[in-house]
Image (spheres, grey):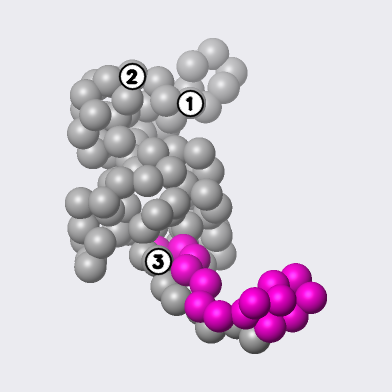
Amino acid sequence: MIKLKIKSGDIVRVIAGDHKGEEGKVLRVYKEKNKAIVEGVNMVSKHTKPSAKSPQGGIVKKEASIQISNISLIDPKTKEATRVGIRVEGDKKVRFSKKSNQVL
């Protein structure tokens, strides 16, 4: 398993695939599958039967997962997609933007 440099709560941009160029917040990361769920990106329709939870039933829109390799972190300083590095500061490992060299 590889070290993932994208975490929940990060703002990312899709860099490949059908949703290229869209931006959103990472809601969840699945390390074992190398996938993430991004808010408002890769929406799918799910047909649901009426139940106690949803008495109406019908078609529900929800986010599907997207490959980690297809998303890139947005640099908070330049607002552009950037690569992420890891360095040691003191006794802690921190993530930093390779474009602006700013700690994330």
Q: Measure the alpha-carbon separation of dots 1 and 3.
A: 32 Å
Give the crowd class for mark 2: few <14, some 14-19, many >=20 residues within 10 Å.
few
Mark 1: secondary structure: strand
Which callout, 1 or 2, points to the residue nearer the camera? 2
Give the crowd class for mark 1: few <14, some 14-19, many >=20 residues within 10 Å.
few
User: Residue 92, image x and y in percent?
Assistant: 57, 22
The residue where tag 1 is placed is 94
- Residue 87 appears in the rendering: no
- 16, above or below 21, in the image: below
Label whose residue precedes the other's in the sequence (1 or 3): 3
Check if mark 1's residue and mark 3's residue have beta carbons within 8 Å.
no
- Please tell me whether residue 83 belongs to the stretch shown in magenta: no
Mark 2: secondary structure: loop
Label whose residue precedes the other's in the sequence (1 or 2): 1
Q: Measure the alpha-carbon separation of dots 2 and 3.
A: 32 Å
Amino acid beneath label 3 = Met
Amino acid beneath label 1 = Val
